[in-house]
Amino acid sequence: MLIPRFLLRHQITIEPYLGDTSKGPKYGAPVVVRCFLDEQTRSVLSPGGEDVTSTSTAYADPGTAAPPLSRVTLPSGRVTTVIAVLDRNGGGLPTPDHVEIQLK
């Protein structure tokens, strides 16, 4: 079961992080993603195990590509980066499968 369409009320723009170059970070083409955006501050763990403050969390369809360090533009115009992406799969249970994107 996918996250219900009526919950995906927001749109964010994700520019996937491709790596570093001599001129700084390199990003892929921007992709507009429908999601539910929850703007609240909380403490999360980065992929490296560091305790980081997250100011927003986006809930999107499974398979949404947002590698850590990707650049994300929120509906307000604020630009932030991805801390971590978590696959929320109910394994066949009647829960809404989705991707949780934790943002700085």
Image: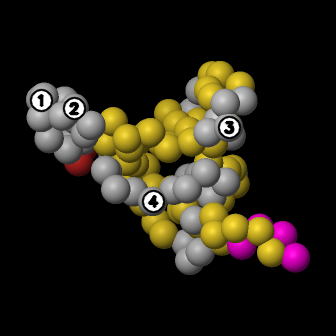
Residue at the image position 12 percent from the left and 34 percent from the top: 92
Q: Mark 4 and mark 1 in contact (Cβ < 8 Å)?
A: no
Q: Quadrant of the C terminus?
A: top right
Residue at the image position 45 percent from the left and 59 percent from the top: 65
Numbered tag placed on residue 65 in the rendering: 4
**Which amino acid, mark 2?**
Gly
Can you say whether 49 is above or below 85 in the image?
above
Please, what secondary structure does the residue beneath circle 1 have? loop
Instruction: Say if the magenta span includes residue 25.
Output: yes
Horizontal arrangement in the rendering, residue 94 relative to residue 24 (left or right): left
Q: Is residue 103 visible?
A: no
Query: Are there few (<14), some (14-19), or many (20+) residues within 10 Å of tag 2?
Result: few
Horizontal arrangement in the rendering, residue 61 relative to residue 66 (left or right): left
Task: Tell me the quarter of the picture where residue 96 sits.
Answer: top left
Q: CA distance from mark 2 to mark 1?
A: 7 Å
For discs 1 and 3, the disc positioned in front in the rendered view: 3
